[in-house]
Amino acid sequence: MKQPVRVAVTGAAGQIGYALLFRIASGAMLGNDQPVILQLLDITPAMEALQGVKMELDDCAFPLLQDVVCTDDPNVAFKDADYALLVGARPRGPGMERKDLLEANAAIFSVQGKAMNEHASRDIKVLVVGNPANTNALIAQRNAPDLNPRNFTAMTRLDQNRAMTQLAQKTGTAVTDVTNMIIWGNHSSTQFPDLYHANVAGGNAMDKVEQDWYENDFIPTVQQRGAAIIKARGASSAASAANAAIDHMRDWALGTADGDSVSMAVYSDGSYGIQEGLIFSFPCTCKDGDWSIVQGQDINEFSQAKLEATETELAEERDAVSHLLP
Ligand code: NAX
């Protein structure tokens, strides 16, 4: 049996946490041969609810689950952590401007970045789910100067999974026929779902759909899916978000399939002209626990304008919190 790894999850008493923890503990994220220790962080008023979640984890008697730590102290939650899923974030309250939201989250993610810098494994793999996810990841990364910036990522996998199913349904194929379905940029309504490089059953996706459907149906549906779920369910996506977090971490840790690429918001090295240092979603492949950005894709005029719009938004988010960045 392998040595157990430590998985920190923040916002663990929340609705995504409830859909996520049981799957991590069951082996869905890191494999059926990888024991895990869960280190769960939430705020002090949520400690009782978190204890209830721990009781249910205990009651599953998961063979791979070696221990569950519940805490309201980031220094405890991130101690020796090999993986961190940062789900907890400050939601937008009544009357809150976008700038207030960015600042409230900057406070949370700077504390957590510092705690990881001090206490986590040097190889920690961090996924930020809590919104605004890309900029929260940037803030955590900048507050962890002793860790490799490549260790910090944000989630656009839910957007990718949404896009894969929309495309499969439109073309009458199975989701397993869809590959290289990439979301570029920010996890927000400026994200760019790119069909020019996606494949359906071995052929190019754009040969199987009309441009009009792509621009006026597919892109807005994927971009607005989160809002549609809130409208229908009265609560934001939870199980599908947790599922995407599992997909993101599993591929990063265990590798992507040959010939396929996945959407990960990662530290920009300037690829495709995107400003260095932004946490930007690119087509990525993963191998041996490391990711790389797929290079050399042709970007047409339509795509270039979309990439620039989402890059501009991310640069504005960064600038809005720059006074809080070290
Ligand atoms: P909930 O409100 O159900 O849970 C959030 C939890 O975080 C609560 O238990 C809260 O006490 C905790 N929390 C707040 N501040 C904290 C802090 N400083 N340290 C630790 N825990 C803290 O929200 P939920 O539905 O679980 O969503 C969590 C986040 O995911 C939200 O920011 C949401 O916007 C974001 N999402 C991101 C998605 C993505 O694709 N990247 C999709 C789904 C989701 O909308």
Image (spheres, rainbow, N blue to C red):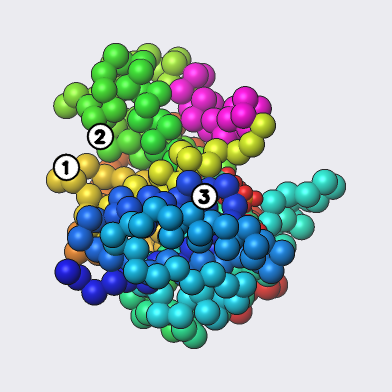
C-alpha span from label 2 to label 3: 29 Å
- The answer to which quarter of the image holds residue 107 is bottom right
Q: Where's the C terminus, which quadrant?
A: bottom right
Give the image location of residue 190, x and y in percent.
55, 39
Foreground: 244 or 292? Answer: 244
Q: Dot 1 corresponds to which residue?
A: 259
Secondary structure predominantly adopted by residues drawn in magenta: helix
Rendered residue at 22%/50% (across/down)? 256
Q: Is mark 2 within 8 Å of ligand 1?
A: no
Q: Secondary structure at mark 1?
A: loop
Q: Secondary structure at mark 2?
A: strand
Viewed as shown, does residue 189 lie left or right of 44?
A: left
Q: Is residue 9 above or below residue 120?
A: above
Rendered residue at 37%/26% (across/down)? 165
Give the image location of residue 86, x and y in percent.
51, 61
Q: Where's the N terminus, which quadrant?
A: bottom left
Give the image location of residue 57, x and y in percent.
44, 57
At label 3, which amino acid type do we have? Answer: Tyr
Q: Dot 2 corresponds to which residue?
A: 179
Q: Dot 3 corresponds to which residue?
A: 18
What residue range appears in magenta? Answer: 216-233
At label 2, which amino acid type do we have? Answer: Thr
Q: Secondary structure at mark 3?
A: helix
In terms of sequence position, does the residue under pointer 3 or pointer 1 come before the other?
A: 3
In terms of sequence position, does the residue under pointer 2 or pointer 1 come before the other?
A: 2
Say whether marks 2 and 1 touch (CB < 8 Å). Answer: yes
